[in-house]
Image (spheres, helix red, strand yellow):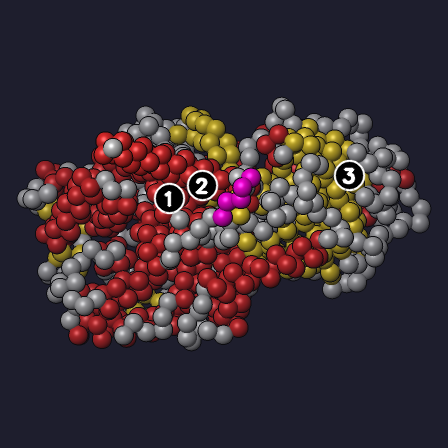
Amino acid sequence: MFWMAFIWLEFSILISLIWALEYETSLKDMFDEANDKSLLWGPYRSNLYLGIRPRVPESLLTGLIWFRADDYRSVGNARHQCDSGDDMDTFGWMEYDPRSVGREIIRDTQLQLSLEADFVKSGDGENWALRIRGTSKDKNAITSLVFYAGMEGEDNALLLKSPKDTPELVKGHEVSMFGFSQPLGGAFLLNITEGNDSRHPKVRKLKDKSLDPSRTHHVSMFVPEDNVWKAKDILLVLLRENMNFGGDVEQLKKIPPVEMLQLKNPSFKDGNVHFIQKTFKGPIEMTVTFNVIESGDQLNDQNFDDKFNKALTGFKDKFNRKFQLERPFANATYTKFARELLSQLLGGIGYFHGNQLVDREANLDQDNVKLEGKPEGPYSLFSCVPSRTFFPRGFYWDEGFQLMPILNYDSDLALDIIKSWFSLIDSDGWIAREQILGEESRSRVPEDFVVQNPNIANPPTMMMIFSQLLHLANLRKEGSIEVTTEGQTVLKELGDVHLTNPDVLNSYAEEIYPKLRLHYEWFRTTQRGDMDAIGRHCRHPEEIYRWKGRDEEHCLPSGLDDYPRCSADASELDVDLLSWMGVMTRSMAKIARLLDKRDDAKLYMQRLGYIQENMEELHWSENNSSYCDITVNDDEEDIFECHLGYASLMPFVHRLISTGSSHLLQILRDIRDPEKLWTEYGVRSLSKQDEFFHQGEDYWRGHIWINMNYLILDALSYYGKHQDTTPEIKELAGQIYKDLRTNVVENVYREYQRTGYAWEQYNEATGEGQRTKNFLGWTSLVVLMMKMPETIQ
């Protein structure tokens, strides 16, 4: 009897293990399906003012072009691509959740037009609708809106369904198109309608009835798939053809511009790209709906407002739950400011697809190396962008900072983006620091920056996200995913599943861990320094590092482009890179512990200890009372290269200095010293006393950057609250923390109100925003600053 009971017990345990494994797999699969559906569609052409597409390569691309149609010159200012040269009072997604809803506001000063674009998705994420409303200061202003849809992919189709009176004039004002794409759900309908009260300009005597501006125009043509993104160029060519048709200039002057600026079909057969033009007199209203024919939750003109308003209320409620701002920012004014910054950051998320240019043969140790790339790919990337106007692509070093606010709002989304980045890793462990995928992306990048090299690194900022994620997971109680008897999932809070379900988090970590490890070892191999060239003894020569691929004027790999460094032809060890390797090693240890990989965790912690020892033994300069780079002089003697600023603060901001270190007090005093780093708007990037302060290009040589000020605040909180730091350090850290948090947030807010934009950097003397405007990227970290406690005591 005993042995039978024992066998039964073993059998029961085995069945339980099998069921648990199947449940875990089922749970992950169901989450993946629901997550993918909810993120399928969005304004993922974030380089455009308005462009909806799916996270699917070679599928449907849509966009909006607009221009004033009462002036021939205005068509040259047609809006399409986000451009810093456009005279916009402001633009951006002021309310936006990538899973459900968004509202973009565009104040076009030059065209005297205000546009509001409302976007909403069906509950299952399959369908979407876009409603565009516009008003002008001139109630009789004539404005043309051109919505286009281009279908890529051999197995996909998009055809006009609506009847026509002529090759370009649609019967009535509703345009309906039928399409098919298996990844998008199969057969679908794309409809374009207008508001019931819409007015259109009328021309008493038309020279050409096919150019009637009171009618809805449609033109379709075949365009090579890799040229669909050139829709604006194609449109302008079509409109210029009308000008040629008009005869000589004097004759053209007699024809109203609104007539000549209408789409006409020059005998094209229907193809893969469709242009729909509506010209409005006064207020604008146009609605676009996409519905999979077999889907249940469809969107239309009648239910749009109800669906949108409910989703928008849900977004605001979620934001208020996730971001409970602390004094002095716990009020409606700063809540609106924070919500707009987060929304604009989320609204910059894009989906990119195409090949990239890589030079795997260049010798970076040679002077004046010019990279010559060969195409590799295609690849796909789902990523934030630092700026929709100037940097509309993925940047490795920016991404970790950009994901910090997103992690606090939707951790599942943040991890989805990280997974996309690490899907790009090559067999050696390299990820390109700039993701310039496809011709559309390359068209926005200076030629010298297009080609990537697999020996050039960038700060591994995304590794910070894992540490923050595990911290947030520990703060959350275990949640649940409800599973119905039919096997369908009901996700109570899609966006927090990894935080509240250990099985899903562990599954994610297991999947990505091998890629992280490969990437980590790539850093250790390619960026390792040469101790023999420095000529100094070191107990841990395997943990010394220098940025590879810099030149005399710039160290682009470091992210701190023109920050002062030693001569490029000298050997060097870089304190900021050693600090980043500490961040990376610590994060690897945490992930290894999560996965119960004890030997790996032990190895990483040992390496972290070596990094911290090297930090003190090699990089601390007693004479300069600062952490410094190391190089050699003309006599081949090792010397410190010291420049007080962001690079020298890296050991501090990454918490790599012992809480009992005497160095902490000096660092705090340097930060608080107005003659060195302190300003009333934030901490300077370079000391006021440095010989290179505001010299040369003056990019990272004095002015204020929000990403580093955020890390400084985080470190002040850590050391200021730690039980092992001295009372003097606690008091000084607390004072600096409170003042710095208030100064930075209030200045960014003040400039946002004054200019309508967040900025790339802020002037250390005046606080004014400068360089790139509409730079949400890491400037959106002020949202997290407002969430931080007012004091740390």
Residue sitting nearer the eye, 268 or 205: 268
Query: Circles 2 and 1: CB distance less than 8 Å?
Result: yes
| x 61%, y 35%: residue | 184
State left or right for residue 591 relative to residue 756: left
CA distance separating discs 3 and 2:
39 Å
Q: Is residue 254 visible?
A: yes
CA distance separating discs 3 and 1:
45 Å
Amino acid on which disc 2 is placed: Leu
Which quadrant holds the N terminus?
Answer: top left
| x 20%, y 55%: residue | 656
**Which numbered circle lies on residue 738?**
none
Query: Circles 3 and 1: CB distance less than 8 Å?
Result: no
Give percent across and percent down for residue 424: 40, 34
Q: Magenta residues?
A: 482-486
Of the image marks 3 and 2, the number of the one nearer the N terminus: 2
Residue sitting nearer the eye, 661 or 504: 504
The residue wearing badge 3 is 176
Give the secondary structure at mark 1: helix
**Which numbered circle lies on residue 503?**
1
Of the image marks 3 and 1, the number of the one nearer the N terminus: 3
Q: Which class describes the residues within 10 Å of circle 1: few (<14), some (14-19), or many (20+)? A: some
Give the secondary structure at mark 2: helix
- Residue at the limit of the structure toward the top, as seen here: 154
Of the image marks 2 and 1, the number of the one nearer the N terminus: 2
- Residue at the limit of the structure toward the front, as seen here: 1
User: Which of the two discs, 3 and 1, sits closer to the camera?
Assistant: 1
Q: Which class describes the residues within 10 Å of circle 2: few (<14), some (14-19), or many (20+)? A: some
